[in-house]
Amino acid sequence: MIPLRSTTAAAATGMLFAYNGAVVGAYAAALPVFQTRFALTPLQLSGLLVSVGAAAIVAMQVSGRLGDRFGARRVALVIVPVLIVGIFGIGQATTLPALFGFGALIGLGNGGIDVAMNAIGVQVERHRSRPIMSLLHGMWSVGNLIGAALLLLMVTTLHLSDVAGVQLATSTVATIGVGVLILGWRIVPETEPVDHTDHATGGRTAIPASAWIMGLMAIAFGLGEGTGMDAATASLGVTMIAAFMVVIRLLGDFLVMRFGRRWVTRFGGATSAVGYLIVALATPFPVLLVGWALVGLGIGMIAPQVYAVAGHSAGGRGLAVVVTFGYVTFLVGPAIIGGLVALVGVQHAMFLPAVLLSGLLLLSRVMPAPDA
């Protein structure tokens, strides 16, 4: 049995994060090709995205509760094959029903493993002397970039058509998944079930109020991240957000060790809010890039800390609440911002995420103090 405190356990958990990121990256990169290949109308494309999102939300709730009951390791390793079949099938799909069906499998796999792997990460971190959640989320971001880059690599290096590039890229991610599954059964650590029984009454304990407050925090960073990836239409702007999110997540655990999760979250909220204020008020392109860099830097700090505290304090159920709030907001955020853009223009619409992210300065009081 792999000890939860071991380096192997940490590496195995990071592998799950990276693979989930690769699947999501490959799927997202393939969406424009699917839209062209199947001549998807805006309504059909929205239907695909909604079906993937709805499947993920359902899986999050089930995964959190099953993980608490049977152990998150079992749940995660059962879900990896769902991701493998989903990403392979959607790349090979030739009909619209197949596209939607395999898309729903990707949603189920993504939502389920999102909660399960974070729950594993929380237990690994609990048995170590140093925090690790920021690094794990950094591995997700690295995997996401690799998954998205595979399609570009297939098309530019091998001179494949877009359709053939998607087929090869998704097949490659699926093949990697088989290796992840085989290795995962050997090295992913066994996790402990979480008991939610109220031993005084014999009933179930309620989800702590702090989990719902952290759900509100997830709304703030979910809207901030979704808006950034949608509004920073210039490819360099999106690159700045993604790159700075990766950098800060790879360094974030050091900041947690030094300052504690509460202050790291507050600094992340303040930094991303300032970034959005710059985007809302500035016009020179170099200044806008600085704003988007601050958005990525700030938001990259927040999610790992919120997920970690939710998992430590409320188990898989609490994680499911927080992850769902953030995920739903990430999905609907661009639509909300789009409505604001129509009313007040692009730059003025950026005040909304700035206000919500600045609210983390207050909401982060629910997180443990630095000396906890």
Image (tube, helix red, strand yellow):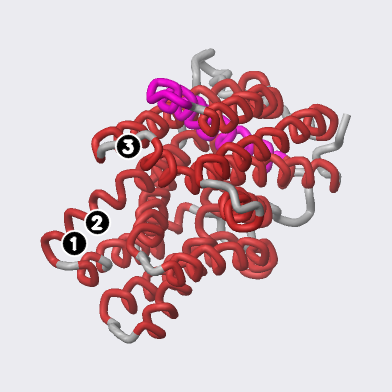
Give the residues drawn in magenta, as a range.
Answer: 94-123
- Could you tell me which residue is drawn at 79 percent across and 54 percent down? 129
Circle 3 Cα neighbour tier, 10 Å, few/some/many (<14 / 14–19 / ≥20): few
Q: Which residue is mark 2?
A: 337
- Could you tell me which residue is drawn at 59 percent across and 57 percent down? 156
- The numbered mark at residue 132 is none
Circle 1 Cα neighbour tier, 10 Å, few/some/many (<14 / 14–19 / ≥20): some
Q: CA distance from mark 1 to mark 2?
A: 6 Å
CB-based contact (under 8 Å), mark 1 and mark 2: yes
Under tag 3, what secondary structure? loop
Q: Is residue 118 visible?
A: no
Q: Which residue is mark 1?
A: 341
Q: Which residue is mark 3?
A: 39
Expressed as whole percent of the image width and height from the top left, the position of residue 119 reads 63, 36
- In this rendered view, identify the residue nearer to me: 210 or 352: 352
Q: Is residue 110 magenta?
A: yes
> With 146 as the anchor, is 192 left or right in this view?
right
Judge whether 353 appears above or below 176 on screen.
below
Judge whether 118 appears above or below 343 on screen.
above
Q: Tell me the amino acid under the disc marked 3.
A: Ala
Going from N to C along the chain, the mark reached first, 2 or 3, is: 3
Expressed as whole percent of the image width and height from the top left, the position of residue 74 reads 70, 23
